[in-house]
Amino acid sequence: MGEVELLRGELARREQEIGRQVAQAVALDLMQRGTRTLEIATPLNFVWAYVYSGEWIADCPSGCGNAEFVTGKHPRDRGVAGTRGAPYAEFVCSCCRYRCPISWPAEAGAISAVLDRRPVPHTRNWFPRGHALAVATGIPTGQSVDELLAENHDHGVH
Ligand SMILES: [Zn+2]
């Protein structure tokens, strides 16, 4: 591949990233004003990574109802604290074949490290702010690493 093609690819990637960040900012602004849920405000051109029972997953935005693991791990390591799979950049739905980029929190590694200290896998959860599933079920969203650490502390996990 020539240098020009590489630069074009990098430019396209950056444009996509900027578009994603703008879309996220608009979605968050709408949610903070209480006019939209994340599900409604978020366009279909990316998915949000979140932690469910210790695994980073994302819901298919096409409406097919599927969710996918979004890290590369051996199946035997799923649900095992302390095992890290490389984060995927792209979501690919194994059900409907929808593809789009994945939005990761900047502190994903630290979130995993704090959650992995919890001995019970189903207590290892983290949702981005306003995540519809969490909001619908009364689970906190947008927690900081410090807030997760405080939860650990409250339950005797260090
Ligand atoms: Zn799908």
Image: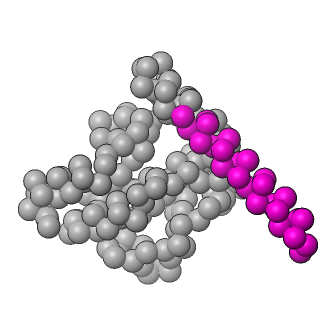
Residue 109 sits in which quadrant?
A: bottom left
Foreground pick, 67 / 157: 157
* Magenta segment, prevailing SS (helix, strand or loop): helix
Residue 59 appears anywhere in the view: no
Residue located 63% across and 57% down the image:
91
User: Residue 30, relative to residue 68: is it above or below?
Assistant: above
Foreground pick, 79 / 106: 106
Image spot of residue 58 (x, y percent): 52, 53
Asked whether 68 falls inside the magenta stretch, the response is no
Q: Identify the image's colour scheme: rainbow, by chain, secondary structure or one colour.
A: one colour
User: Residue 24, relative to residue 67: is it above or below?
Assistant: above
Foreground pick, 158 / 95: 158
Question: Where is the C terminus found, in terms of image quarters?
Answer: bottom left
Question: Where is the N terminus found, in terms of image quarters?
Answer: bottom right
Q: Give the total of numbered labels.
A: 0
Q: Going by the image, does 108 lie left or right of 11?
A: left
Residue located 52% across and 48% down the image:
48
Foreground pick, 108 / 70: 108
Residue 20 sits in which quadrant?
A: top right
Image spot of residue 155 (x, y percent): 11, 57
Q: Going by the image, does 56 lie left or right of 90?
A: left
Asked whether 21 falls inside the magenta stretch, the response is yes
User: Residue 40, relative to residue 141: is it above or below?
Assistant: above
Image spot of residue 139 (x, y percent): 30, 41
Residue 156 appears anywhere in the view: yes
Residue located 48% across and 32% down the image:
28
Image spot of residue 57 (x, y percent): 49, 58
Q: Going by the image, does 43 lie left or right of 69?
A: right
| Range of magenta residues | 1-25
Residue located 91% across and 73% down the image:
2
